[in-house]
Amino acid sequence: MSAIKIIYAIKSMPVGGSQTHLVQVLKLLDRRRFDPMLCCLTGEGSLLDAARAAGVRVIDGEMHSGFKGWQTLAGVLNFARFLRRERVQIVHNYLLRANVVGAVAARLARVPVVLCSKRGCHE
């Protein structure tokens, strides 16, 4: 039985609580059962090296200039094509922007399992 392809999506990977948590998940995930990838929508953040060091393939979502207008639509469509091409089985999104971009892309790509995570204590 082959490992389940799972991709984690997040806006960026600066040092922060959710990002540090995600690095720990990537380090501790059972590689016999799961084949993890990380899509960083902006391709930015000092914790990307920690994800790579954990043996995780890191994908740059190429949404470098923000989440407005056509760039967001292009980012969603590009991510959907990637998910379809890679035959990803689970998309787990972290935080607001990735929840929106990742969930829409995953549904367009017909990924069977889509998770959205809100983290933190915000009003």
Image: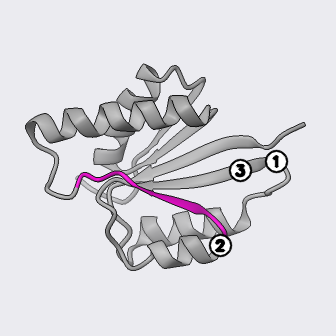
Q: Give residue 103's quadrant in the image.
A: top left
Q: Earlier in the sequence, mark 2 or mark 1?
A: 1
The amino acid type found where label 3 is placed reads: Asp
- Residue 6 lies, in percent from the top left, at 62, 44
Q: Quick one: SS at disc 3?
A: strand
In the rendered image, residue 59 lying in the magenta stretch gets the answer yes
The stretch of residues the image draws in magenta is 55-63
Residue picked out by circle 3: 35
Residue picked out by circle 2: 54
Which of 62 and 50 lies nearest the eye of the viewer? 62
CA distance separating discs 1 and 3: 7 Å
Q: Quick one: SS at disc 2?
A: loop
CA distance separating discs 2 and 1: 16 Å
Q: Which mark is residue 46?
A: none
Q: Is residue 65 left or right of residue 43?
A: left
The amino acid type found where label 2 is placed reads: Ala
Q: Is residue 97 above or below residue 89?
A: below
Residue picked out by circle 1: 33
